[in-house]
Amino acid sequence: MESQVPFSRDPKGRSVLESPPRPDPDHDLKHRIQKILANAGVASRRNVEEMIRQRRVALNGKIVTDLPILIDPATDKIEVDGEAVNLGGDRGGPRIYILLNKPKNVYATNVAQGEQTRAIDLLPPNLPGRVYPVGRLDADSKGLLLLTNDGELTHRLTHARFGVAKTYRAVVDGFVDGRTLEALGKGIWLTDPRGGGGFKTGPTHLKIVTRSHTATVLDITLREVRNRQIPQMLAKMGHKLRDLTRVRMGPLTLHGLSPGQFRHLTSREVTQLRTLGRREKPQFTT
């Protein structure tokens, strides 16, 4: 039996072969959960993967831990740390970009744990959308923290591929000499606390602010920062970290902001952040 070939007739009565119907690109289309949560402003794609490993993400009421995870934003329900996520990523509302001078003992996370103060607790309660911290900044560390609901910008600012420079002012014990600066500038091997093994730090730009025989203040600029990396770097070189403040991210600085204060980014600053990504050769300065 011959197959039936669909056809129709044109206005002159001639037979015309019909093309098969095209699938609806919005029908039954699934996406990787990292992309969806990044677009929703939860975190960068890499940080979403870490959150999944930490059992902080639930799909339709069940904790998920094994990647890849494909979801349909139209039907699936996602929770992060027990809170439902708007999978539209606030695309129907305004993008929000807030620069906060985070004080010490304030947590750069949206997870509520007991009486801990979170960075978002320092912001007005009537913001037109939910914002999330960009990258890590330990509770013991202070300084520049960006909060936004722009997932694509979060990805650009935190992914190693873009190499966005971040500068930290560190106060350490002892006199940091030129050999230590040179070693740190070229990169040193550290133990990875999460998986054993080790990794080599990337090229680092260091600048002495002040130093004496008992203490040194220096600015440390890196393009990729792992959790607790700076204290590890300094400790391996024999210098205990006493205080750490992030003072710059790309073009953003803490100028005019006291601890606990915040401001909205200007449109020019947002444009500058979106164009970041060119790598420059790091240096060390004695």
Image: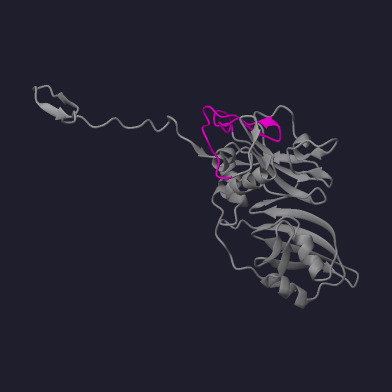
Q: Residue furthest right?
A: 214
Q: Which residues are magenta?
A: 67-94
User: Of 216 and 183, which appears nearest the observer?
Assistant: 183
Please identify the dominant SS of the magenta region: loop
In the rendered image, the quadrant that contains the C terminus is bottom right
Q: Position of residue 78 (x, y in %)?
A: 61, 32
Residue 187: quadrant of the picture = bottom right
Q: Is residue 54 above or below residue 184?
A: above
Instruction: Tell me the quarter of the image containing the N terminus.
Output: top left
Q: Position of residue 256 (x, y in %)?
A: 75, 46
Residue 171 placement, left or right of 281: right
Residue at 73%, 66% (x, y): give it.
Answer: 190
Indicate the position of residue 31 as horizontal and vertical percent values. 50, 38
Q: Assess whether residue 133 is covered by the magenta stretch.
A: no
Note whether 282 is above or below 60 in the view shown: below
User: Is 32 on the left-hand or right-hand side of 211?
Assistant: left
Q: Residue 46: x and y, percent? A: 61, 49
At 69% from the left edge and 70% from the top edge, which residue is drawn?
185
Image vertical order of residue 10 relative to residue 150, above or below: above
Comparing 267 with 78, the one in front is 78
Residue 83 in magenta stretch: yes
